[in-house]
Amino acid sequence: MTDTQDDDILEGEVYQNTEVLVTPKVPETQKNLRLDKFLVSCYPQFSRNQMIRLIKEGAVSVEDCPSRTLAPDDEVKVGEHFKIIPPEATPADPVPENIPLDILYEDKDLLVVNKPAGLVVHPGAGNTHGTLVNALLAHCGDSLSGIGGVRRPGIVHRIDKDTSGILVVAKNDWAHRHLAEQFAEHTIERVYQAFVWGFVKNTTGVISGYIGRSPTNRQKMAVVKTNGKHATTHYERLEVFGGGLASHIQCTLETGRTHQIRVHMASIGHSLIGDTVYGIVPYHAPEALKFFPRQALHAGFLGFIHPTTEERMTFEVPLPEDMQTLLNNLRSLSCVDQTDHFTHQG
């Protein structure tokens, strides 16, 4: 789903144009404009999110006062002009690997893939090969966008390793910038299917709260009061199983924060089946459900505007085999009164 800068928007680590840029002086008509907006108005080849990253990394300075610290939301003043020194482009580290891809759509600008559970999106610590990026490099060669970063070319957004579903990949920088802007403006449609523990009482609901690093465990995310990013998840209950042991829900994301659905559902007492990080398994759950091997989460629908044709594109894929089997197992549970202990997560 990412769930600005959205956590699932990945850009800004490499740039095709590395020359030093100096803006014109701020005119009267643009005084008090946010710095990031002013810079993008001068250099539209950069997306706003990319410019925010440059400012935060110290690549932007005031021409007449280079020691001054800048923030993206600083208001520019008449007569100021700014220098931008983008970092040099670096070749991608990952190597092409012949990994099969389930490609739903492809043209000169982008491709849409259905990622299986277990496939890491881009290389990182402990995952230097066998990733979606390695597969994309073998399939696309040098055509992938460089804005995604030296270790994740073409990647505009991501889903967790153990989440299955749809991703759109940029094949050039133009497509990358336009898709990233749609994510930043929350106009991308992302709908997920999930199976959670407990009886979700409301047919529909909205979870809204800040997500950041857990103050008690830095390896986890949590709903926090400070030092987090705003996140909103809409959910709809589709089906209830075993008298309330578990529920099938559909989640629509407004934002794309790290682990957003997993954290939000756990925060209201309905962690995802199979989620060993945020989950609390009911003691009375059948063994087959207790040991589902991944979080039961599937990015089943994605909608966006094509960056070149400006046509609305939508893609939908059914539940993968393991989650369909899970659904069948849940439906086979005998029903009991929803007022008993199954109505609450254990």
Image (tube, grey):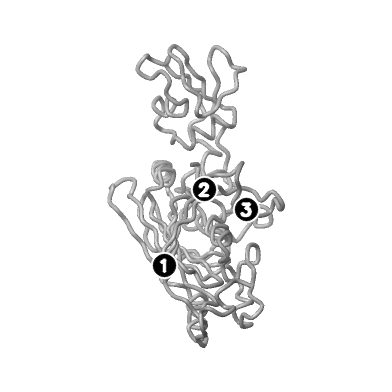
Q: Position of residue 256 (x, y in %)?
A: 49, 51
Q: Amino acid at mark 1?
A: Thr
Q: Is residue 195 left or right of residue 33?
A: right
Viewport quadrant of the C terminus:
bottom right
> Which residue corresponds to mark 3?
221
Task: From the viewer's side, name the closer residue of 96 and 153.
Answer: 153
Residue drawn at x 55%, y 77% is 245
Q: Is residue 227 left or right of residue 107?
A: right
Q: Quadrant of residue 182?
A: top left
**Tag of residue 32:** none
Task: From the viewer's side, name the closer residue of 268 and 135.
Answer: 268
Q: Is residue 183 above or below residue 106?
A: above
Q: Position of residue 142 (x, y in %)?
A: 48, 48
Q: Is residue 172 above or below residue 239?
A: above
Q: Earlier in the sequence, mark 1 or mark 3?
A: 1
Element assignment for label 2: loop
> Which residue corresponds to mark 2?
153
Separation (CA) of disc 2 from disc 1: 40 Å
Q: Residues within 10 Å of mark 3 (few under 14, many from 20)?
A: many
Q: Position of residue 163 (x, y in %)?
A: 54, 64
Q: Residues within 10 Å of mark 1 (few under 14, many from 20)?
A: few
Q: Is residue 171 above or below residue 23?
A: below
Element assignment for label 3: strand
Task: From the viewer's side, name the closer residue of 287 and 81.
Answer: 287
> Which residue corresponds to mark 1?
203
Q: Amino acid at mark 2?
A: Pro
Foreground label between 1 and 3: 1
Q: Position of residue 315 (x, y in %)?
A: 36, 62
Foreground label between 2 and 1: 1
Separation (CA) of disc 3 from disc 2: 26 Å
Element assignment for label 1: loop
